[in-house]
């Protein structure tokens, strides 16, 4: 009889504990590992609140560092020490709603390092400004002049200058690592 009482007590414990064990939460599942962001050098991105911006690695398809001979239809218009400036006759470029002409490619030590493009009118200026703000960030005013704007983006400096008296402006991109050796007088490194 004692054996029967122990058996009944064990059975009651088992039945009482079974539902309680069933109500316990299931073991935690492993979360899938988050994919690591691709490693990038610090100079390639600019961080702003809510946005990570990659510096432009080219201008209209021509990558920084491209040799002058690799850019089709160039005509050299000026040489200054290690610097050379060239144009593509008759080319018209578009940024935003603005059409740009008189584009000058800047080469330093035979590598594409800068570009300067002229535009006409306040409407074109505003269109380019809005395009650059949308693509990158709000600009920095150079010397507190609202008509002289800059976007420092890693190794690339973008400048947008508007001259009200001429109703014209210039958009410039400078790839600093390649442009710096030719940015001084006579196309040499600044002293």
Image (spheres, grey):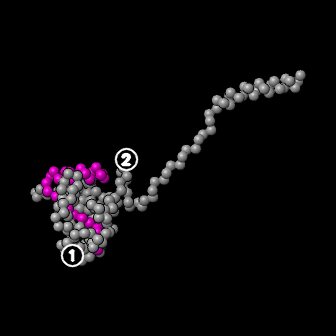
For the point 46% across and 54% down, the residue is 37
| Spot occupied by residue 65 in the image (x, y as percentages of width and height) | 32, 69
Distance of mark 2 from mark 1, alpha carbons?
43 Å
Q: Find the magenta span and give its range.
A: 110-138
26 versus 186 height, above or below: above
Is residue 20 visible in this depiction of the protein?
yes
| Residue 104 horizontal side relative to residue 23, left or right | left
Q: Is residue 167 rendered magenta in the image?
A: no
Mark 2 Cα within 10 Å, few/some/many (few <14, many 20+)? few
Numbered badge on residue 79: 1
For the point 80% across and 25% down, the residue is 9
> What secondary structure is marked by label 2?
loop
Ranked by sequence position, the earlier of labels 2 and 1 is: 2
For the point 20% across and 62% down, the residue is 117
| Spot occupied by residue 90 in the image (x, y as percentages of width and height) | 16, 64
Is residue 185 visible in this depiction of the protein?
no
20 versus 174 height, above or below: above
Quadrant position of the N terminus in the picture? top right
Residue at the spot of label 2: 50
Mark 1 Cα within 10 Å, few/some/many (few <14, many 20+)? some
Q: Foreground mark, 2 or 1? A: 1
For the point 26% across and 69% down, the residue is 71
Nearest the eye: 89 or 187? 89
Q: Quadrant of residue 25?
A: top right
12 versus 100 height, above or below: above
Pick out the residue farthest to the front: 72
């Amino acid at each position: 009889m004692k054996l029967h009482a122990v058996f009944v007590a064990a059975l009651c414990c088992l039945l009482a504990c079974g539902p309680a064990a069933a109500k316990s939460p299931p073991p935690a599942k492993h979360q899938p590992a988050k994919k690591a962001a691709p490693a990038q050098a610090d100079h390639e991105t600019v961080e702003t609140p809510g946005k990570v911006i990659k510096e432009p690695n080219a201008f209209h398809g021509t990558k920084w560092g491209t040799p002058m001979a690799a850019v089709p239809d160039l005509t050299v218009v000026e040489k200054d020490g290690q610097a050379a400036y060239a144009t593509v006759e008759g080319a018209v470029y578009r940024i935003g709603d603005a059409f740009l002409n008189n584009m000058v490619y800047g080469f330093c030590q035979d590598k594409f390092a800068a570009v300067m493009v002229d535009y006409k009118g306040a409407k074109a200026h505003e269109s380019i400004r809005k395009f650059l703000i949308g693509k990158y960030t709000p600009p920095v005013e150079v010397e507190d002049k609202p008509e002289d704007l800059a976007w420092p983006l890693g190794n690339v400096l973008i400048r947008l200058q508007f001259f009200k008296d001429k109703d014209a402006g210039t958009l410039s991109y400078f790839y600093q690592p390649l442009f710096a050796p030719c940015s001084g007088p006579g196309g040499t490194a600044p002293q």
